[in-house]
Amino acid sequence: MTRRLSVSIRPDGTIAAEASGTPGPDCLEALEQLKALLHAEVEASKPTPEFALLPETVQDEAAARQRLEGQA
Amino acid sequence: MSIGALLIPLGMALIGAVTSAATKLEEQGRTELTPIRVSDPQLVAAALESLGATNVAVEEHLVTATTATGVIRFERVGQVFAGVLLGAPQEASARAAADVEAAAGRLAQARTAELAKAQAAELGFTLIEERTEQGTINYVFEEIA
């Protein structure tokens, strides 16, 4: 599946973005790509509904990585 | 799977920084100052200039300028800048600060749009779609196979 980044740059400077096409929790790594692409900081991030369809272990790992990223 | 995110460009601040600046100003009884979502003094200055202000002076923690309605002064409060239109009623002062914040947003938008296009190839992506709707610039990038 092709990795895709959709970006909406609003007139107030804020940016809504979505990264898709990455396998499992690797999607969280896409946040790093978005930060590099946009020279921006992440204010909030959330897996989209498809995330809920993943096995619990994958969700747990992704959540843990997200927490670690938040602490960094 | 996919992930959605809200991002703030460099030079602008996370909403939490504005909230803490507002709390700090309230505690200090300095409610004449209106905090804005801008952390970079150069961006404050550029926003003022884009609005036609003159005599724009920039220091690390202070930006001043002359506008059509008077002298405006921004000072750093925590991570953000907070502004006051000297001698003006609170409402007019808050409106002037909000105008500068909006101008800064427009400048940040233009800068981010340029950067994204320039950076895409370096990160291995190509722009496959570009459109502007109600002032929002939308791009779709796809990874180069």
Image (cartoon, rainbow, N blue to C red):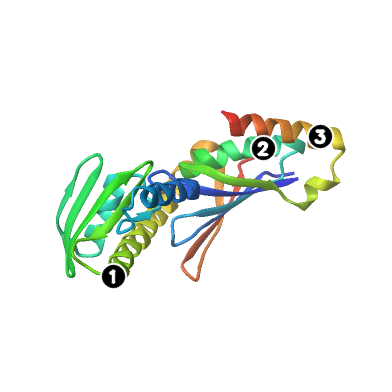
Provide the chain ID for the residue under circle 2: A
Residue type at the position of mark 3:
Val
Residue at left offset 18%, top offset 70%: B69
- Asked whether the residues under the numbered discs 1 and 2 touch, taking CB atoms below 8 Å apart as contact, a structural biologist would say no
User: Which circle marks residue B92 in the picture?
Assistant: 1
Give the residue pinned by disc 3: A58
Residue at left offset 53%, top offset 37%: B123
Distance from the alpha carbon under mark 1 to that under mark 2? 44 Å
- Asked whether the residues under the numbered discs 3 and 1 touch, taking CB atoms below 8 Å apart as contact, a structural biologist would say no
Residue B44 lies, in percent from the top left, at 29, 52
Task: Tell me the quadrant of the picture where the N terminus of chain B can be found.
Answer: top right
Q: Residues within 10 Å of mark 2 (few under 14, many from 20)?
A: many
Residue at left offset 44%, top offset 55%: A13
Residue B133 lies, in percent from the top left, at 52, 69
B33 left or right, relative to B53: right
Residue type at the position of mark 1:
Ala
Residue B5 lies, in percent from the top left, at 61, 48
Give the residue pinned by disc 2: A28
Task: Tell me the quadrant of the picture where the C terminus of chain B can be found.
Answer: top right
Residue B79: which quarter of the image?
top left
The numbered mark, 3 or 2, whose residue comes first in the sequence reads 2
User: Looking at the image, can residue A11 be seen?
Assistant: yes
Circle 1: element type: helix
Query: Which numbered mark, 1 or 2, is in the foreground of this view?
Result: 1
User: Which circle marks residue A5 in the picture?
Assistant: none
Provide the chain ID for the residue under circle 1: B
Circle 3: element type: helix
Q: Residues within 10 Å of mark 3 (few under 14, many from 20)?
A: some
Q: Residues within 10 Å of mark 1 (few under 14, many from 20)?
A: some
